[in-house]
Image (tube, rainbow, N blue to C red):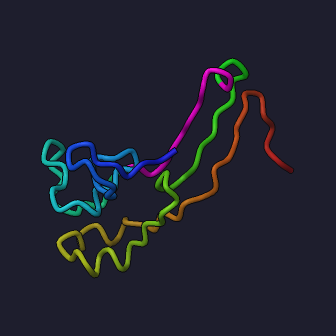
Amino acid sequence: MSDHYDVVLKKEVADERTLCGHVDSSARGVPEWEWGANYPGGAVQGKVMDDTMAASMTLRARIGHPCGADFIAAPFLKAHPEYSWQAPILRDMKAGPWTTFQAGQKPAK
């Protein structure tokens, strides 16, 4: 589950006011959190569950932006050198597939 609909602008745009939380694409940033424009933050995982899934202790999850977009650090830092201080710890976040997990599930061997 993901969404790029900004309810303030009333249009599709990947920014900080959507479920995917693409703050890195926002010229506004999130001043309430002291995140400047294009801050490398936002949703980096997605989890969904409905009532049927809850009854069976099941959920679906994905690592990375819920929409499936990858975050690649090198081009981001090239475009936004003001965040170069994060280079030693800023890592790529490649989106994985949506995967189903259930309580009591054993790891694959």
Q: Position of residue 43 (x, y in %)?
A: 40, 49
Q: Position of residue 56 (x, y in %)?
A: 73, 22
Q: Position of residue 20 (x, y in %)?
A: 40, 50
Up/down of 87 relative to 6, above or below: below
Q: Residue furthest front?
A: 10
The foreground one among 3 and 36 is 3
Q: Residue furthest top?
A: 55
Occupied quadrant, residue 49:
top right
Up/down of 40 relative to 83, above or below: above
User: Within the magenta stretch, is there residue 24?
Assistant: no
User: Within the magenta stretch, is there residue 52?
Assistant: yes
The foreground one among 21 and 77 is 21
Name which residue lies at 81% across and 37% down: 106
Name which residue lies at 19% across and 55% down: 29
Q: How many marks?
A: 0
Q: Residue furthest right?
A: 109
Left or right, 19 with reference to 32: right
Name which residue lies at 37% across and 52% down: 4
The foreground one among 42 and 9 is 9
Q: Position of residue 86 (x, y in %)?
A: 28, 67
Occupied quadrant, residue 50:
top right
Name which residue lies at 23% across and 63% down: 38
Left or right, 106 with reference to 21: right
First to last magenta residue range: 43-53
Left or right, 28 with reference to 93: left
